[in-house]
Image (tube, rainbow, N blue to C red):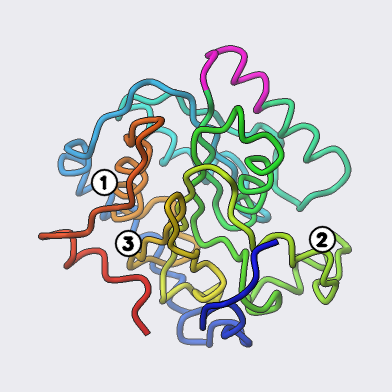
Amino acid sequence: MQKANHWYDFNALRPPGILKLVLEARLGWEYAATVAARPLLAMAPRGDGHPVLVLPGMLAGDLTTRPLRRYLKRQGYTPYAWEQGLNLGPREGVIEAMLERLKTIYLKHERPVSLIGWSLGGLYARELAKAHPEIVRSVITMGTPFTGHPKATNAWRVYQFVTGHKLDREDLHEPLRAPPPVPTTSIFSRTDGIVSWHCSLEHATEHSESIEVKASHLGMGMNPLTLYAIADRLAQPEHDWKPFDRSGVLACLYPNPYRR
């Protein structure tokens, strides 16, 4: 198990404040910005047709990931929805159904599948990749709380109510901190109004990284900065992954995620 040795591992003790929570209402503007930026987003790196399974956040379903999946299809990928209705947490049968869907997609294409998970969906993606790295090409998460304090979100009470899982159980959240053994990207926002951004900051290693975007939590999956970053990450060669290059003009759009 990976030991905590960075300042951000346990720094997040509180959920985002009321101002950030109120700013979650900007998700409509983020979607409008994506529509306006469609010609520019089309210039992002193109895909090689490999399959991508997209997992929604808590209390969300495939409707929320439709804009992302449509974009991925236009960019040359083969996106798949999770097809399990609303995400009500890891209730009985959910993990098994996701694993079966992952295996089915892999066998259909005969190539590893990239996993994209939004918030709680990102935890699913990370754990699926840990369980079966041989059929997972890469993992991308958006606003996913896999480290920091387990209650440093504005959704932890909802999660406990829906799932019945108590977040003060160390055996529940401690194993989530280790990254999967495949290329892994955590996309996060310091203005996230649901999840404290510290909880989504991944260690920088030879196969894991963090990318910071200016986005809300609820609008992250339809934010133009997020979509470009996802397209760039998915376009990485299967056996020649490199960290996100934020040099040049991209440095203005994507700040250094590890700054204090």
**Label 1 is placed on what type of residue?**
Val
Q: Earlier in the sequence, mark 1 or mark 3?
A: 3
- The span from disc 1 to disc 2 (Cα, nearest Å) is 34 Å
Q: Is residue 258 magenta?
A: no
- The span from disc 3 to disc 2 (Cα, nearest Å) is 29 Å
* Residue topped by disc 3: 29
Q: Earlier in the sequence, mark 1 or mark 2?
A: 1
**Label 3 is placed on what type of residue?**
Trp
Q: Residue 226, which numbered label?
A: none
Query: Magenta region: which residues?
Result: 102-111
Q: Quadrant of the N terminus?
A: bottom right
Horizontal and vertical percent for residue 164? 88, 63
Q: Residue furthest left?
A: 248
* Crowding at mark 3 (Cα within 10 Å: few <14, some 14-19, many 20+): few
* Residue topped by disc 1: 35
User: SS for tag 1?
Assistant: helix
Q: Eyeballing the image, is 129 above or below 143? A: above
User: SS for tag 3?
Assistant: helix
Q: Quadrant of the C terminus?
A: bottom left
**Label 2 is placed on what type of residue?**
Val
Q: Eyeballing the image, is 70 above or below 182? A: above
Residue 212 seen in the figure: yes
Residue at coordinates 81% horizontally, 63% vertically from top-left? 172
Q: What secondary structure do most residues of the magenta stretch adopt?
A: helix
* Residue topped by disc 2: 162
Q: Which quarter of the figure has residue 53?
A: top right
